[in-house]
Image (tube, rainbow, N blue to C red):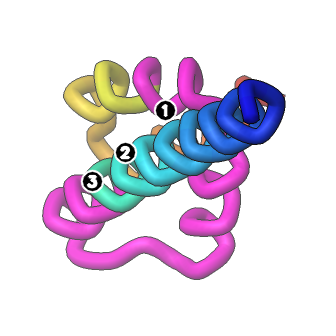
Amino acid sequence: MEIVTSWMEKGIEKGIERGIGQGEQRIIKRQLKRRFNNISATLESRINSLSSEQIENLADAIFDFQSLEDLTNWLEQQN
């Protein structure tokens, strides 16, 4: 019974982590869309591929962006 419980707990933890990450991505994309009126599907895809740490860094960097070019340059530096 403990093995099943441990397995289930790990699955639940991973699901929660994934959900939190998706929520963070959604908020970042919403902020960028509000700031720049819209962002391309390509930029959205690149944001979706960022790690949790990179999303947190992007959340701080947004305040320094003056244009979508700044966002694009920031994303290129992450690879």
Residue most toward the left?
A: 34
Residue at image location 66% in from the left, 35% down from the top:
5
Between the residue at mark 2 and the residue at mark 3, the CA separation in whole angstroms equals: 5 Å
Residue 69 visible in the current orientation: no
Numbered circle sitting on residue 28: none
From where the camera sits, is residue 77 visible?
A: yes
> Which is nearer the N-term, disc 1 or disc 3?
3
Please rate how many residues cluster around mark 2, counting C-alpha atoms within 10 Å: few if below 14, some from 14 to 19, many from 20.
Answer: some
* Vertical side of 79 occupied by 27: above or below: below
To which residue does mark 3 refer? 27
Looking at the rendered structure, the secondary structure element under dot 3 is helix
Mark 2: amino acid = Glu
Q: Which mark is residue 24?
A: 2
Task: Read off the magenta span.
Answer: 29-57
The quarter of the image holding the N terminus is top right
Q: For the residues marked 1 and 2, what is the alpha-carbon distance in whole angstroms?
A: 7 Å
In the rendered structure, which amino acid carries the disc numbered 3? Ile
Q: Mark 1–mark 2 contact, CB under 8 Å?
A: yes
The residue labelled by disc 1 is 55
Q: In this rendering, which labeled residue sits more in front, label 1 or label 2?
A: 2
Q: Nearer the viewer, residue 5 or 42?
A: 5
